[in-house]
Amino acid sequence: MLTPLVTGNKIVVYPTSGDEPVILNVFRDRQAGVVKLTPSHLNLIKDMDNTRSSIKCLIVGGEDLKSELAREVYESFGGKVQIFNEYGPTETVVGCMIHPYNPETDTRISVPIGKPAANVQLYVLNKHQQLLPAGSPGELYIGGDGVSRGYFGRPELTMQKFVPNPFKEGTTLYRTGDLVQWLPNGDMEFLGRIDHQVKIRGYRIEPGEIEYRLLQQPEVRDVIVTPRKDEAQQSYLCAYIVPADPSRVMDIVQLKQGLHEELPAYMIPAFFIVMDQLPLTVNGKVDLKALPEPEGSVTALQAYTPPETELERQMANIWEDILPVKPISIHANLFEMGANSLNVMSFVSRLYSLLNFRIPFKDIFEKPTIADLANFVEKAKDLLEDYTEDCMQLTRTSEKNRMVFCFPPAASMGIAYMTLAQHLDSFGVYSFNFITSEDRIARYAQMMIDVQKEGPFTLMGYSSGGVLAFDVAKELNRRGYEVRDLIILDSKYRTEVEEHHLTEEQIRQEIQQKFNMSQYQDLEKLANDYLLELITKSYLYVHEAITFGTIDGNISYVTSGLSDANASIALWAQSTTGQFREVKGYGKHMEMIDKNYPEIVKQNALLINELLLTSTK
């Protein structure tokens, strides 16, 4: 408040009328030249004609400023306004960085929050308080003269939020709890609150991205996406929408279809609630507590169609027992209902016990409704009786010989590559489960030949899957086929047999911990009948494998920076008669293809895509 006064200007105070938001009067009154407000306030004035307004400068803070909203406000002024996106918590004397909005360059989802002000230090750190490079999301820590001493009378909270600065002895950093990243031009981008990140069906989701996509729809004026929990404490997303034209009935089905074209199924909200306006707190922020609870079940927007055949009835009974949703329409998308890969395993196991044939996992993902799946099974029953899930196609391409074959790490399966494959747009991606029979290498090679018919072939393996992929590449060479590329993701070159094997009981415990099976029903038979044998054999293969020989294809080694990686890199470099490239990947070893770290997986996928597209032979 002192700034305008000490510069010879004035402060205009507006009383609350109660009839309409005060902000509308501020913009109509033509008294103020500078207004400080929140993005929620901007949503109320973006459709006004502000071309004759006295306001020449908007300072925006308190919430994430979406680029689309900034553009609409800027255009409402006819381009004759400055918009500053300011960031800074109370604990650091509020404003510690600011960014002037530029409609030509600020085209990302959110407007950047800028560069540090004088006497302010900004650090983007991981959970170990280590510095992160540009493009890597992390928590924002703030240092400098503006950092306060702590919270009065709250020593425990002070110790939690105000921590010693590991980069400047004797000073303090404030932990903001905000997720940010540095952009290549030196600006900082706000990504959301760390404690507001949502985990739905095992995927970490940033609601802001969904909001951005919805705001692209002309019928949407404002939106907030927030997580909710159902009666079974399962998380789902709910979108609260303010329509651009309140007089028209919003077509929610069409809105969802538009989202499906832009986002994966797990990011589609289960509920869409239309509101006249979003509720605001006295500070002008969206009041999440005042948002209404959705009425009905998660399937409320899905018209219910009951089973018509005995097979559909059996499938529906199994899915209704697995998922916390009843009833399930035979035309409902199971993954929109909350199904994940472990639910699929449970379904496959129970249907196998009931009907004595196993459905391929890939077909459940490709036919995600009970009706489509039952129709497929009726036509393929005879083929499925002897089926084993050795190979699945994760993505498709129309281009010949643009295929990547992925090999599983120990204690995992081919589905581990699902998230990675979604970002390899230029390639058809196939992934293998571990084959338990001793002739696995020959069988892998033959399956690749059956799919692609002729070389050159591209293979990829993460962790111990890299050893497996290398052995298959050698087998293809032995048969006279050309290998173009082998992508190895952080895989140890094995020069000797490991001495200590896990016992069967230790492997069982590994399965229980890795897959958290206690929360899923009817997986005991699956563990004994399929997974236990698969994982046991994969462990034995890895522990007994010795890497040797060479291939004719290029090898690209993507490392996470393991402490013993240098020795493996040197040995892998000698394993090809073609080119060898070592590149630094993203994330730690266990994060590189893990679906719980979607941004890291996406960055690694983009890196792999570049390696393959620039490869020469």
Image (spheres, helix red, strand yellow):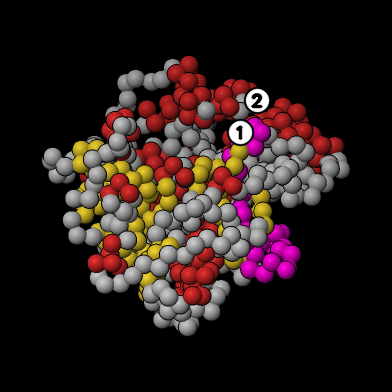
Q: Are marks 1 and 2 in contact (CB under 8 Å)?
A: no
Q: Which residues are magenta?
A: 230-256
Q: Is residue 350 above or below residue 188?
A: above
CA separation in Å, label 1 and label 2: 20 Å
Instruction: Identify the residue at horizontal 49%, vertical 78% (top origin).
Output: 50
Q: Nearer the viewer, residue 589 or 287?
A: 287
Q: Secondary structure at mark 1?
A: loop
Write down the quadrant of residue 521 in the picture: top right
Any magenta on residue 291?
A: no
Instruction: Identify the residue at horizontal 45%, vertical 69% (top origin).
Output: 70
Q: Nearer the viewer, mark 1 or mark 2?
A: 1
Which three-letter amino acid code belongs to the residue tagged 1? Gln
Q: Earlier in the sequence, mark 1 or mark 2?
A: 1
Q: Nearer the viewer, residue 425 or 92?
A: 92
Q: Residues within 10 Å of mark 1 (few under 14, many from 20)?
A: few
Instruction: Identify the residue at horizontal 13%, vertical 40% (top origin).
Output: 170
**What residue did someone put label 2 on?**
522
Percent coordinates x, y for residue 422 in the rendering = 51, 54
Query: Where the C terminus falls, by quadrant?
Result: bottom left
